[in-house]
Amino acid sequence: MFNNSNVKQFWKRAQRYFSVTSPPIQGFLLPNGSIVSTTVEMCGMAKEFYEEQFSDHENNSSIIEMEAERVDNQLTSDMQRGTIPTCTIELKHITKAISALKNKNSTGLDGVSNKMIKLLPKPYHNAFPIKTR
């Protein structure tokens, strides 16, 4: 059955089919070649399809995805408790990481490219919140 969040996902997905410019749905073509055209049958089929889509599925995550989820959950828990573990990053680590970046001009979501970071003069590496030695 749908819970509240799944109902929202359903309507978000279905919204594109219910615009003024979309032609009306006149029927469903089944894999065996038959056509279902009555409103009651179409609604029942759509209900079954979306219930299956939004039901709990077997977790097929890879080992890396499961580890990432575990770490993410641990960090979220630590942040909520205010016990975020700290680590010391030295200036030489930042400089090494910057020099290891590929020379790419494409920008990320922040609008900054690797090339821009690599062109940043070394004295500005101190702007990163790190503990220097």
Image (tube, rainbow, N blue to C red):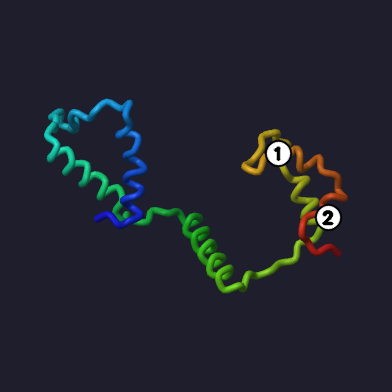
- Give x and y (percent) for residue 77: 53, 69
Tag 2: residue type? Asn
Label 1 SS = loop
Residue at image x 51%, y 64%? Answer: 73
Which of 72 and 40 lies nearest the eye of the viewer?
40
- Give x and y (percent) for residue 17: 31, 33
Residue annotated with mark 1: 113
Above or below 128: residue 18 = above
Residue at image x 64%, y 41%? Answer: 108
- Give x and y (percent) for residue 129: 76, 59
Q: Quadrant of residue 128?
A: bottom right
- Give x and y (percent) for residue 74: 53, 67
Label number found at residue 34: none
Q: Tag 1: Cα neighbours inside 10 Å, few (<14), some, or many (≥20)?
A: some
Label number found at residue 126: 2
Total count of labels: 2
- Cα separation between marks 1 and 2: 19 Å
Q: Quadrant of the C terminus?
A: bottom right
* Mark nearer the N terminus (1 vs 2): 1
